[in-house]
Image (cartoon, helix red, strand yellow):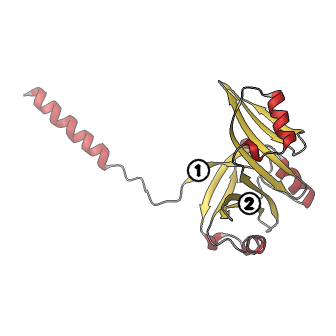
Amino acid sequence: MKMKNFVIVTLISGIGLFSCDNTRKDTVTETTVPAPIDTVASDAATITTIAQQATRDGNGIVIKNDEVPDTIRTSFTTKYPRVKKSEWYRYQPVEEDEMKMDDSYYYVRFNDNGADYTTWYNNRGEWVKTATKVPGNKNLPDAVNKYINVNYPGYTIEEISKENDKDMDMYEIKMNKGDSKVKLKILPNGKVFKRKRN
């Protein structure tokens, strides 16, 4: 009898725990997304410097089209007039960014002419940078492939992105060989701009 009562009490407790979960499922959630740049810029030179820095993680919050400042939407539609579908995010830096956090960036993901892009703007509507995935190392400049072949033999390329800002193009290449992981930011001429090992 005692065992039967114990089982009943346990079942009722379990049901109570499940029924008390009133977590809202319809709220906007923050997701950690790769962000090609950091935040904050006070002038054009600073914007360029920020756009050239290594990737950092932050919180990208999905926002509705009408939540994007008019200056940013105008800048985007002027630069990419053919794009009909896009998804906007407000970037919130994390403390580890080691940047001032008094300015927010916005970025938009979209497809143009069959390629996926991410484009960044500061909150004044100034274009900061655009990144797109590169399908395989056969689409890299010869100098970049040569550098990888000489310096990272046996590594497998996981992902390649081409980034463009106001001053330069560069490639971000993620590679691995067993437990060794490397992320390169490399210029089209084969010069390494930034290197990170895990």
Residue highlighted by disc 2:
119
Q: Nearer the viewer, mark 1 or mark 2?
A: 2
Alpha carbon of mark 1 to alpha carbon of mark 2: how far? Answer: 18 Å
Mark before the other along the chain sequence, 1 or 2: 1
Q: For the residue labelled by badge 2, is the local secondary structure a helix, a strand or a loop?
A: strand
Picture coordinates of residue 38, whole percent (x, y): 77, 50
Q: For the residue labelled by badge 1, is the local secondary structure a helix, a strand or a loop?
A: strand
Residue that appears at 85% across and 48% down = 52
Picture coordinates of residue 30, whole percent (x, y): 58, 53
Residue 166, quarter of the rendered image: bottom right
Asked if labels 2 and 1 touch by Cβ distance under 8 angstroms, the answer is no
Residue 103, quarter of the rendered image: bottom right
Q: Is residue 78 above or below residue 196?
A: below
Q: Is residue 14 above or below residue 41?
A: above
Picture coordinates of residue 53, whole percent (x, y): 82, 46
Amino acid, disc 1: Thr
Residue that appears at 16% across and 30% down = 6
Count of all numbered marks drawn on residues in the image: 2
Residue highlighted by disc 1:
31
Q: Is residue 189 above or below residue 196?
A: below
Mark 1: few, some, or many residues within 10 Å (few <14, many ≥20)?
Answer: few
- On the rendered image, what quadrant is the C terminus found in? top right
Which residue of the protein is positioned furthest toward the left in this rendering? 1
Residue 25, quarter of the rendered image: bottom left
Picture coordinates of residue 99, whole percent (x, y): 80, 47
From the viewer's side, name the closer residue of 96 and 191.
191
Q: Is residue 57 above or below residue 197?
A: below
- On the rendered image, what quadrant is the N terminus found in? top left
Amino acid, disc 2: Thr
Query: Residue 38, can we see it?
Result: no
